[in-house]
């Protein structure tokens, strides 16, 4: 089974499909955005700094991000993983390659979920998340709505919006992502591990298409 580097503009569905892959194949899910949000919720000084960066739509410093990812990968050594939201700069991709060499990690699929700004914005504005289990729902899509309005199906607690899911911040996030993405895509295309998927398909269809690739060792 291949390890997955999940790339996409914001709100394309990386988290949603990652959860499905964890459930179906037992992957370890490493989401850099989620790690940063946990730090923010801890109330630490570092969390306050991160919060300012995230709510402005910018990127956290490469060295910090690489250290976080190295720690997570070292801790979960030998388990198949999904890296969600990393790398986001060419520098991060190059440093990730060093980590892979150090930890003897290979057999990678770089899965890119393709989406345009309008569709991604709609998804971000409709996204609500369970603060307890972190499950993501969407009020604009019948298949992704919670069963009771604004309540998590599993935890029965009130769902919340993300502070960076405003129209203004989202557009900055989307453009910041694209500014860096093409050089990262070229980097992985050269390594012949890159594959694009249509983010506008249903979550089940996307999952099926990715499963075909990850099982294709
Ligand atoms: P991060 O948390 O990684 O955010 P992101 O990349 O912007 O991605 P999202 O979490 O917004 O979206 P997603 O693709 O997971 O979509 P989801 O499944 O939720 O990063 C946040 C911030 O942290 C960054 O902006 C940056 O500041 C910082 N950061 C993180 N990593 C960093 C790094 N490496 N370096 C520097 N800084 C970093 O789906 C979205 C919505 O759509 C949901 O409501 C869902 O229910 C719905 N949906 C999902 N799939 C479908 C579908 N197929 N059809 C219809 N609706 C769907």
Image (cartoon, rainbow, N blue to C red):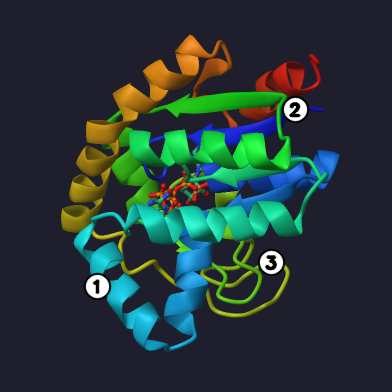
8, 119: nearer the viewer: 8
Q: Is residue 134 visible?
A: yes
Location of residue 88 (image quadrant): top left
| Rendering coords of residue 8 (x, y %) | 43, 34
Disc number placed over residue 176 in the picture, else none: none
Tell me the distance, in whole angstroms, between the alpha carbons under discs 3 and 2.
Answer: 31 Å
Tell me the distance, in whole angstroms, between the alpha carbons under discs 3 and 1.
Answer: 31 Å
Q: Horizontally, is 195 left or right of 52 in the view?
A: right
Name the residue tied to disc 2.
2
101, 125: nearer the viewer: 101
Name the residue tied to disc 1.
52
Q: Residue at x 24, y 60 (%)?
A: 166
Q: Horizontally, is 107 left or right of 24 in the view?
A: left
Q: Is mark 3 within 8 Å of ligand 1?
A: no
Is the residue 2 above or below the residue 45 in the image? above
| Rendering coords of residue 187 (x, y %) | 42, 20
| Rendering coords of residue 59 (x, y %) | 29, 54
Q: Residue at x 47, y 11 (%)?
A: 190
The N terminus is located in which quarter? top right
Name the residue tied to disc 3.
153
SS of the residue under disc 1: helix
């Amino acid at each position: 089974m291949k390890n997955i580097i999940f790339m996409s503009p914001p709100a394309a569905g990386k988290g949603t499909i990652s959860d499905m892959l964890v459930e179906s194949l037992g992957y370890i899910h490493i989401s850099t955005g989620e790690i940063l949000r946990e730090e923010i919720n801890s109330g630490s000084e570092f969390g306050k700094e991160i919060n300012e960066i995230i709510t402005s739509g910018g990127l956290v410093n490469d060295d910090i991000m690489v250290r976080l990812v190295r720690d997570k990968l070292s801790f979960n050594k030998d388990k198949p993983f999904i890296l969600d939201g990393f790398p986001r700069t060419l520098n991060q991709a190059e440093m990730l390659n060093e980590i892979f060499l150090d930890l003897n990690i290979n057999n990678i699929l770089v899965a890119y979920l393709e989406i345009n700004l309008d569709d991604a914005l709609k998804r971000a504005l409709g996204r609500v998340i369970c603060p307890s289990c972190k499950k993501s729902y969407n009020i604009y899509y019948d298949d992704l709505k919670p069963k009771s309005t604004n309540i998590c199906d599993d935890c029965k607690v009130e769902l919340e919006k993300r502070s960076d899911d405003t129209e203004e911040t989202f557009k900055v996030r989307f453009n910041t992502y694209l500014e860096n993405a093409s050089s990262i895509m070229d980097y992985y295309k050269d390594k012949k591990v890159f594959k694009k998927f249509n983010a506008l398909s249903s979550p089940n269809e996307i999952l099926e298409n990715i499963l075909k690739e990850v099982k294709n060792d």
